[in-house]
Image (cartoon, rainbow, N blue to C red):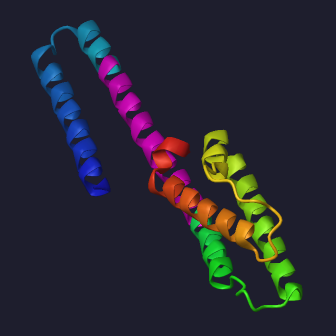
Amino acid sequence: MQLFTVRRRVLYVSVVLLMMLDTLKRFSDSTAYAISMWLMELLVLLLIAYEVMAAIWRHQVVKRRLHTLLKSMEKGHKLEEDTPHPGWPSERISPWKDSVNAWIQETQLLLKSYSAQAEIAFLHDPHVIQPNYRLPVREYHLLVTRLNNLRGIMERPEVYF
């Protein structure tokens, strides 16, 4: 898809250059008019170049941010795989809960540095689970909800970044 837009932009630049040459050929007897046309066409080319560079820069920023979010999502999936089972002793459950809460805070700060909208979407939780279970039901629920929210943010980066 990016190749298509690059080809389109090359085509636009080529057409503008041809128009410039045609203008020069037709109005070569009027120097002031030719110079003004060249200046206007140069300004159009500069505007096109600016738009192309801005689009390329924006694409690189979004790509870099998605790569960082992918790493964060991998950490979250690792925590999900390491979910404690009901028979585990509480000494092993507490560190897992702390890891989940640390991952949520770390990812929240990362998204906050990108945009407030991304942070809010990440923290959105339509369900309420009581916080005083012996098993890490609350943390597991938070982890899964935040992973789903993060996946939604990554699927639509143009909305959040």
On screen, residue 2 above or below 147: above
Which residues make up the magenta segment?
40-67
Q: Residue furthest left?
A: 26
Seen at 50% across and 55% down, the residue is: 152
Seen at 61% across and 76% down, the residue is: 77
Quarter of image, res 86: bottom right
Give the position of the C terminus as an image quadrant: top right
Residue 46 in magenta? yes
Seen at 23% across and 37% down, the residue is: 12
Residue 94 in magenta? no
Q: How many marks?
A: 0
Q: Main secondary structure of the magenta part?
A: helix
Left or right: where 56 falls relative to 120: left
Quarter of image, res 133: bottom right
Expressed as whole percent of the image width and height from the top left, the position of residue 32 reads: 28, 7
On screen, residue 126 above or below 23: below
Left or right: where 154 falls relative to 32: right
Q: Nearer the viewer, residue 55 or 104?
A: 104
On screen, residue 41 above or below 84: above
Give the position of the N terminus as an image quadrant: bottom left
Expressed as whole percent of the image width and height from the top left, the position of residue 127 reads: 63, 53
Seen at 30% across and 15% down, the residue is: 35
Q: Nearer the viewer, residue 74 or 148?
A: 148
Q: Residue furthest right?
A: 91
Expressed as whole percent of the image width and height from the top left, the position of residue 69 reads: 60, 63
Expressed as whole percent of the image width and height from the top left, the position of residue 94 reads: 86, 78
